[in-house]
Image: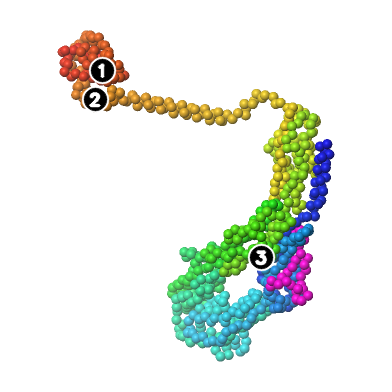
């Protein structure tokens, strides 16, 4: 009967899996383009933009141009909704703009649920240089003077452009070559470290600034500039001076970009070698530490330009340029300021949650160090702004709207893609990610969780589970501290890895084998998002373990040792205390304490009694020649008990003597009794004979 029920359960499992197989849902993920790009093309060039995304079912694609839908039969562009490819056959200025791809995955079932992922922006431009706007001008200088001739205001350009300067002579353009004396900075200004009479161009001869665009094969020229130079003999020498810093006192660059710091020095020393006539330029950073070329640093243009690549916020510091010649040196300073659009601290990440759980999406950004924080993020669901029209009980934000929580996600409703957009004073950043909701692991077949068996019974350990069809389950056994994976199973378990059937036939086991199967069989069922445990306890009703002589072997002897050690330490402490207490009592006389408490001074009385003189045998003539011990008389104790206020003997002849409680002699109370009246104490006679 149990076998029939198990087969029915497995059949129901198969039907469940079949019904769920077509409901595999995975929202789209943009694979390309993931980061913003600018693309520049020649006019009339064919443009192809690709968009790709993953998802189940396969996503379809839509391109938008300048935030407008593209109508292929009315525009000079088209796209394939299934391949994601957009084509502009011949681009002109009319087709320039911002292109964004939307990938949509539509899920089966009622409600037409869908998830829409949004790509990064692609900026498409036609390579060109627009016209200069400037006026003609004449410049005057003395030989040896520093001089700069600015280019006209740079026009709008797309594509890589380069500044050039030309000398116009006889209606021919002759490009000026940069050297140690002549330099063109990144803004297009022409610099002379010192001018010579030969630099003069007047009348039909002139200077003109130009911009070239290699991609567009275009060169645009600015307005005419003339130069008048007055000759000096000799040309005066000059020590270095900072004539120009291209950026001014500070240069602002974008994080992860490239910084070009330029210092132009004037100055002149006479020499036949051109490079020795101009100041030599060196670079320093912070506390005048030399900048060494290599890694991210490059020095070019006769030392005038320091290029730093892959700029980080730690590069924001002071840089120094020093011009030196035989007459002296001069230092210039440039502060490098590193800025950035919002920087992601926690970008949006794809999330997968079990149905019924809350989903949390984070969009946390910051500005560059020392700059104002970014504005509050804007959130979108499937490309549409999450505003007051959305259920606030379903979609909840934290106080600064950097965390979005979707409450109790449901697979049929909440699979979607979310976007966040954050802006600061420098620019804007955008991110896209999707939320997937999956069904939980469901245990379809499991045995009794506690089985009390006897030998000959069948132990059922079959556990079968199902989960969301997007995922595959992994099964493991855990028994007596060991993990069994794949087709492996605990001892004596017959295991069908495909159907997950698991049994122990106890009738085929020896007594020793039978006794070893008792315990807890843990079945671990899991995938990357969830784990479930099923514990089956097997008890043997007919097995009585024999008393083991080594049962005490499991005793924790370290605990017993610890207790004994503590007892020994306590006994030692008590013994030391008793010894110390006894020593303290031995050094204190109880009679002294009582006399002192009664207002007497036993030390003074002892001193006055002359007791200290008794040890001098020569002062007692009676003891000198005595060979006969005189009778001590009868010593009788008085009526007072030892330890009372009068703790003395009065029966030593008629002398009054005092003893301590321990019987030690203190002295004679009456100093008026002479040696002639009373016999000397026997112990003094003995002492004198020593």
Local secondary structure at mark 2: helix
In space, the residues marked 3 and 2 are separated at their CA atoms by 105 Å
Closest to the observer: 404 or 533? 404
Percent across and percent down for residue 244 are: 50, 76
User: Which residue occupies 72% across, 41% down?
Assistant: 534
- Disc 1 to disc 3, how far (Cα)? 112 Å
Query: How many residues crowd mark 2 within 10 Å: few (<14), some (14–19), many (20+)?
Result: some
Check if mark 2's residue and mark 1's residue have beta carbons within 8 Å: no
For discs 1 and 3, the disc positioned in front in the rendered view? 3
Position of the N terminus by quadrant: top right
Q: Is residue 305 above or below residue 641?
A: below
Of discs 3 and 2, which sits in the foreground? 3
Check residue 385 in the rendering and tell me which mark sits there, or answer none.
3
Q: Residues within 10 Å of mark 3 (few under 14, many from 20)?
A: some
Q: Nearer the viewer, residue 484 or 660?
A: 660
As drawn, 331 above or below 23 = below
Q: Are marks 1 and 3 in contact (CB under 8 Å)?
A: no
- Any magenta on residue 72? yes
Q: State the SS at label 1.
A: strand
Q: Earlier in the sequence, mark 1 or mark 3?
A: 3
Q: Is residue 25 magenta?
A: no
Is 671 on the left or on the right of 52, as rendered?
left
| Residue 465, image x, y percentages | 76, 45
Q: Is residue 128 visible?
A: yes
| Residue at 66% over, 53% down | 358
Q: Which residue is mark 2?
A: 602
Instruction: Identify the residue shown where x is 49% and y is 69%.
Output: 320
Magenta residues span: 54-83
Determine whether, in the image, residue 587 is placed left or right of residue 167.
left
């Amino acid at each position: 009967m149990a076998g029939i029920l198990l087969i029915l359960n497995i059949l129901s499992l198969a039907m469940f899996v079949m019904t769920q197989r077509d409901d595999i849902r995975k929202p789209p993920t943009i694979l390309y383009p993931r980061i913003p790009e600018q693309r520049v093309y020649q006019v009339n060039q064919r443009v192809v933009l690709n968009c790709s995304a993953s998802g189940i079912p396969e996503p379809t694609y839509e391109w938008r141009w300048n935030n407008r839908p593209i109508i292929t039969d009315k525009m000079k562009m088209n796209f394939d909704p299934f391949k994601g490819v957009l084509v502009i056959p011949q681009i002109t200025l009319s087709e320039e703009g911002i292109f964004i791809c939307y990938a949509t995955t539509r899920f089966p079932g009622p409600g037409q649920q869908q998830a829409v992922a949004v790509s990064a922006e692609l900026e498409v431009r036609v390579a060109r240089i627009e016209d200069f706007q400037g006026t003609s001008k004449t410049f005057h200088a003395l030989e040896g003077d520093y001089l700069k001739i600015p280019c006209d205001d740079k026009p709008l350009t797309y594509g890589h452009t380069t500044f050039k300067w030309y000398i116009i002579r006889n209606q021919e353009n002759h490009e000026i070559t940069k050297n140690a004396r002549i330099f063109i900075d990144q803004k297009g200004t022409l610099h002379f470290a010192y001018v010579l009479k030969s630099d003069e161009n007047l009348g039909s001869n002139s200077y003109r600034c130009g911009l070239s665009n290699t991609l567009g094969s275009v060169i645009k020229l600015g307005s005419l500039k003339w130069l008048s130079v007055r000759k000096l003999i000799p040309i005066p020498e000059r020590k270095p001076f900072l004539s120009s810093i291209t950026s001014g006192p500070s240069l602002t660059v974008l994080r992860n970009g490239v910084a070009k710091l330029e210092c132009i020095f004037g100055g002149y020393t006479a020499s036949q070698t051109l490079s020795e006539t101009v100041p030599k330029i060196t670079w320093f950073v912070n506390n005048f530490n030399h900048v060494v070329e290599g890694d991210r640093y490059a020095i070019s243009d006769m030392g005038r330009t320091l290029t730093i690549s892959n700029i980080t916020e730690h590069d924001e510091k002071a840089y120094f340029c020093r011009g030196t010649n035989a007459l002296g040196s001069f230092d210039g300073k440039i502060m490098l300021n590193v800025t950035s659009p919002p920087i992601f601290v926690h970008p949006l990440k794809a999330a997968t949650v079990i149905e019924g759980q809350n989903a949390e999406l984070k969009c946390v950004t910051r500005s560059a160090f020392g700059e104002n924080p970014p504005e509050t993020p804007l959130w979108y669901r499937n490309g549409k702004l999450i505003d007051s029209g959305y259920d606030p009980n379903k979609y909840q934000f934290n106080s600064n709207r950097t965390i979005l929580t979707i409450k109790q996600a449901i697979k049929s409703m909440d699979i979607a893609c979310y976007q966040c957009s954050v802006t600061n004073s420098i620019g804007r950043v955008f991110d896209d990610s999707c939320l997937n909701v999956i069904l939980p692991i469901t245990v379809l077949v499991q045995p009794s969780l506690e089985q009390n068996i006897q030998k000959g019974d069948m132990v059922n350990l079959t556990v079968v589970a199902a989960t969301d069809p997007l995922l595959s389950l992994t099964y493991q056994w855990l028994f007596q501290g060991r993990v069994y994976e794949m087709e492996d199973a605990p001892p004596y378990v017959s295991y069908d890895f495909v159907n997950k059937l698991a049994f122990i036939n106890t009738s085929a086991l020896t007594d020793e084998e039978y006794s070893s199967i008792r315990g807890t069989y843990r079945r671990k069922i899991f995938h990357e998002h969830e784990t479930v445990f099923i514990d089956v306890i097997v008890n043997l009703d007919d097995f009585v373990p024999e008393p083991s002589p080594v049962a005490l072997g499991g005793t924790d002897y370290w605990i017993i040792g610890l207790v004994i050690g503590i007892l020994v330490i306590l006994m030692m402490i008590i013994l030391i205390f008793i010894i110390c207490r006894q020593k303290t009592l031995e050094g204190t006389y109880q009679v002294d304490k009582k006399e002192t408490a009664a207002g007497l001074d036993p030390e003074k009385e002892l001193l006055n009694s002359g007791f200290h003189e008794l040890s001098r045998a020569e002062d007692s003539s009676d003891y000198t020649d005595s060979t006969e011990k005189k009778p001590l008389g009868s010593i009788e104790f008085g009526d007072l008990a030892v330890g009372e206020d009068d703790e003395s003997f009065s029966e030593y002849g008629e002398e009054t003597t005092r003893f301590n409680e321990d019987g030690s002699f203190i002295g004679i109370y009456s100093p008026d009794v002479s040696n002639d009246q009373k016999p000397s104490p026997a112990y003094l006679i003995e002492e004198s004979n020593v």
